[in-house]
Image: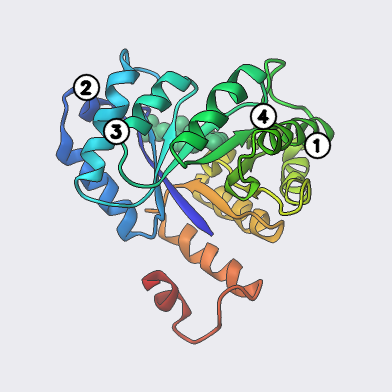
Amino acid sequence: MFIIGELINGMYANIGSAIKERNKKEIQNCALTQIACGADALDINCGPASGQPQVDMPWLVEAIQEVTDKPLCLDSSKPAVIEEGLKASRNKTIINSTTADAEKLEALIPLAKKYESKLIGITISSKGIPQNKDQRLELAAAIVDNCLKACFPVEDLYLDPIVLPVNVAQAQMRDILESIAEFKIISEPGPKTTLGLSNVSQGTHLRSLINRTFLTMAVAYGLDSAILDPKDRELIDTLITAELILDKNIYCDSYLEAYRKK
Ligand code: THG
């Protein structure tokens, strides 16, 4: 599982004020802590309160790459903000994200090619978030189709079914999980899959329990990557164990320690 740490997000109060005050240390500590906990990449989102994301995004990129070479996942709904992040990046990048709308696809697929970035495609369109699995698949297929037409390698595309909170969209959880398996066979070779795990538990009690249960189920449906809180130790232990059960990790009595070190 390719783990993308979610904690450098301006929606968190400490990160929001660190961005405002240009407190590099706070951002760098957050980056290093997530990596120590097992993050393979770091999501970077300036947050809803940022008045100048085109300036904040490259500042964040520069601060983080002073302390790590891990890939950065540039998270913004604005292509211009993502482009400023790409320009500042000297390591691998992931664009987070394009929707299935032509305007976004036409802006972001060429950027992904130009900067040799991976690309997350979320199954959302101008009509909103799909309400069932067929609508999700239709948007996913449109994203894949656009990548194929533009000669963008589909193996570098991560499709995201958009996870909704279980307390508002309980009836959609099964569709979201089944979409993971469906997306992977849209083309040959197929795209990869990712999702924003913490969305599932927003506004609920027992967040951590809901997160790790959903992740375990998603892993069984073939999930390749997730944006999550790597500081949640039980979550990471559960993930390692789920992959053990699926024969992706080799069992030994100290498998948790062994796979945490990997
Ligand atoms: N898909 C893709 N990218 C994404 C998401 C997605 N990026 C953003 C988000 N969703 C994933 N990241 C988070 C980060 C934090 C939370 C949820 C998802 C979260 N935050 C607390 C909350 O809202 O309750 C904030 C708590 C606080 O303020 O301290 O849950 O789905 N491609």
Q: Are marks 4 and 3 in contact (CB under 8 Å)?
A: no
Residue 133: assigned label? 1
- Residue at left offset 49%, top offset 30%: 111
The quarter holding residue 11 reads top left
Badge 4 or badge 1: first in the primary sequence: 1
Residue 110 in picture, x, y percent from top left: 54, 29
In this view, the mark in front (4 or 1) = 1
Please name whichever residue, 259 or 71, is drawn nearer the observer in this view of the structure. 71
Report crowding for label 2: few under 14, some 14 to 19, many 20 or more residues within 10 A (C-alpha).
Answer: some
Q: Are marks 1 and 3 in contact (CB under 8 Å)?
A: no
Which residue is located at x 35 percent, y 17 percent?
Answer: 49
Q: Is residue 254 above or below residue 203?
A: below
Q: CA distance from mark 4 to mark 1?
A: 17 Å
Mark 2 sits on what residue?
A: 20
**Image position of 172 (left or right of 35):** right
User: Which residue type does callout 4 highlight?
Assistant: Val
Name the N-terminal-most of marks 2 and 1: 2
